[in-house]
Amino acid sequence: MAIEFEKQSLARPEGEAIKRRAFSFFTAAFCLICCFATSATSIPMMAYWTEALGLTSAETAMTVVNYFGGCVLTLLLFARFSNLLGRKPVVIMALICGIGACYLFSTALTASDINLGRFLQGLCCGLATSASMAWVVDTAPREKAWLGTAMTAAGPNIGLSLGTLLTGLIIEYDVLNPAHLFEACIGLLLIGIVCSVFSTETMRFGTESLGQVIIPKIALPARLVRLFFVGVSAYIGTWGVSSFFQGFSGQFALIVFGQSSVLLAAITYLLLIIPIAVCSLLSGRFNPIKTTFVMITAFLVGTAGVFINLNLQNQWLFIASVVVAGAAMGGTWCAVLKFLLMDATLKERAGLISALYLGAYVGSSIPNFSVGQLAKNATMADISCGFGVWITITWVIVVLALLFIRKAPSEAEAKRFN
């Protein structure tokens, strides 16, 4: 039914249909990027808020937990709402949540304001993860279907890169004050709403009933269960490290470079996130299973280097390790999405993507929660040792699981190994 609707909605004269599809793809990608770009503004701003509001390390870690809490809540309860309401209404809901977060940040006076704003950003990015990503794949050019998967993997990181860089430059060079910065973000999100209104819907209203979408469940095709385990393990392990960077990039800059500012915090985070975005796009053309083997190993090496050199305070080796770790994360995310979505139907996409990101958000919040609640007096050396165990377990699980599946693959799994 949904596939027929997509064909009918785009069954206009060929030139017009192509233009409408291209505009809708642009809008879906634009909204996805904007949700994460405006979310990223708070990452380098933590350096500013830490000084202005006197935030402790535990409070900083809890801002990340609140963000992931909003993501998890959305993906658990509203992951498949776009199968009921359509992609466009849910994307607009995501943009509205982002606007609410930006308003709170523009007037923030306490840690509670930051936490509530981060929670709303979590809702925004959670809705964007399920609806915008599915919309991107739905509207990708037919002759370049891989572009939809690549943009799905790279879009959030492109947004995070742009948001982090622009925030650092704008605040450091006093182009805008923090309040005006977040007001500008509100304007950007409003543009996304307008573009969404005039774009093409790809999911018929009521494709699934309210009863079907409101009941929390992991919507996984049976043929992909074992591969999903591999994918979600890779996402949890890599996201656990990248999410830690979100809250602590300012402190990393202070440790390694001897000083901290909004710009230095932004640069430190960009060293991770730009390679993620670039490698997410570049790895879309390669065999996803082989890419996963290579990238998860590079992640082990690069991330180990990050925490070792963080304690040694070796600037250049720290920078190189962060870049390697970021590239490995991006390559892993794109490869996982590619082998999971390879033969997914239109109806399966939102649930499959949401299930993957739900697992990633829940799992990757564990190290931040541990730092925020269970390790308040831990040193960076203690935290580094904990992450050493974390990344090693990730590598072992992913590699052994893939080797196990390769020995006796099902028909659907064999397609991916070939």
Image: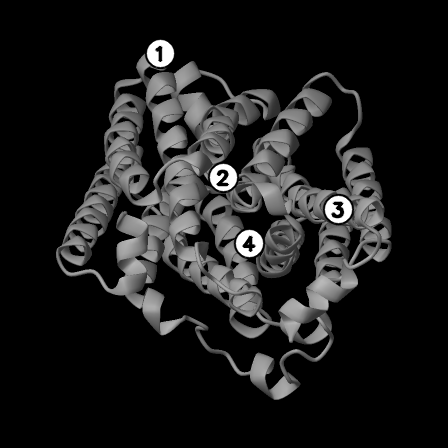
Residue 274: tell me if it is visible.
yes
Q: CA distance from mark 3 to mark 2?
A: 26 Å
Element class at badge 2: helix
Picture mark count: 4
Q: CA distance from mark 1 to mark 3?
A: 39 Å
Q: Amino acid at mark 2?
A: Gln
- Residue drawn at (79%, 49%), measured in percent from left and top? 14
Crowding at mark 3 (Cα within 10 Å: few <14, some 14-19, many 20+)? many
Q: CA distance from mark 4 to mark 3?
A: 24 Å
Is 268 on the left-hand or right-hand side of 228?
A: right
Comes first in the chain, label 1 or label 3: 3
Element class at badge 1: helix
Q: Residue 246: which numbered mark, if any? A: 2
Q: CA distance from mark 1 to mark 4?
A: 31 Å
Residue 122 in picture, x, y percent from top left: 59, 56
Q: Amino acid at mark 3?
A: Thr
Element class at badge 3: helix
CB within 8 Å, label 1 to label 3: no
Asked if residue 30 is positioned above or below residue 134 in the image, the reply reads above
Residue beneath label 4, please? 67
Comes first in the chain, label 3 or label 2: 3
Is 291 on the left-hand or right-hand side of 108?
A: left
- Residue drawn at (83%, 56%), measured in percent from left and top? 12
Comes first in the chain, label 2 or label 1: 2
Residue beneath label 1, please? 316
Foreground label between 1 and 3: 3
Q: Residue 27: which numbered mark, if any? A: 3
Crowding at mark 1 (Cα within 10 Å: few <14, some 14-19, many 20+)? few
CB within 8 Å, label 2 to label 4: yes
